[in-house]
Image: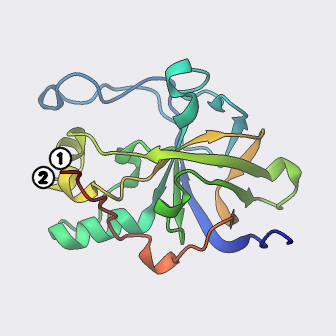
Amino acid sequence: MAPLAPFEYPVEIELLLVSPEHAYFGRPRDGAADVPTSYPEAAEVVAGKGLVGDRFFGKAAHMDAAVTLFAAEALEEIARELGTGPLDPTLTRRNVVLRGAELAPLVGEEFTIRSGDGGDEDAVTLRGGRPAHPCAWMDRVLATGVHAAMRGRGGVRCMPLTDGVLRRGPAVLVSPVRLDPARAGVAVRRPRLP
């Protein structure tokens, strides 16, 4: 039996964030650290290590979660629910903000993002590791209530499986599982065990 063809979804890479240091540590009431952060047009990805220049690059404790993807629609839905007005996606400190991608089904899956001209250099294969749970900092830096509202839609932490470059702008997400882009902002709550 032949394998099923992958599903392809047009997406937009709206933001790339690379920072060599953590901005959110300690107590949120003390405020975020002022750390160098860049929002490049393109970010180099190294298999098994992450985004070149990022705080998680090559860190053993973060190999399975070196790159975090986040859906732009999730933050927009949170803002709508809380009535805050637009929220700044840079403050989530997620590495890659995508538009048009339901991310929760990618946990445990290998998938590819083709950006730029879509050539081999502009294709990065990732393995969805685990959900990216929000931290209490979200209430401090975005708005009161964002921490709770972001649960179930904080993104996906991934391990890069191939070298390549991610580029801002139009891209294609190639998934082995069917995704529903209309659900990109919907919180996915996993049932609690008794």
First reached walking from the N terminus: tag 2 or tag 1: 1
- Location of residue 58 by image quarter: top right
On the rendered structure, is 9 left or right of 93? right
How crowded pointer 1 is (Cα within 10 Å; few <14, some 14-19, many 20+) is rated as some
**Dot 1: element:** helix
**One can see residue 176 in this view:** yes
> Where 51 sits versus 117, above or below?
above
Mark drawn on residue 157: none
Look at 55% across and 58% down and name the residue there. 106
On the rendered structure, is 64 left or right of 5? left
> Where 181 sits versus 71, above or below?
below
Q: Position of residue 13 (x, y in %)?
A: 59, 60
Q: Identify the residue under disc 1.
A: 139
Say which amino acid is labelled 1.
Asp
How crowded pointer 2 is (Cα within 10 Å; few <14, some 14-19, many 20+) is rated as some
> Where 133 sits versus 25, above or below?
below
Q: Position of residue 105 (x, y in %)?
A: 51, 63
**One can see residue 66 in this view:** no
Do labels 2 and 1 touch, CB within 8 Å?
yes
Q: Identify the residue under disc 2.
A: 144
Image quarter hosting the N terminus? bottom right
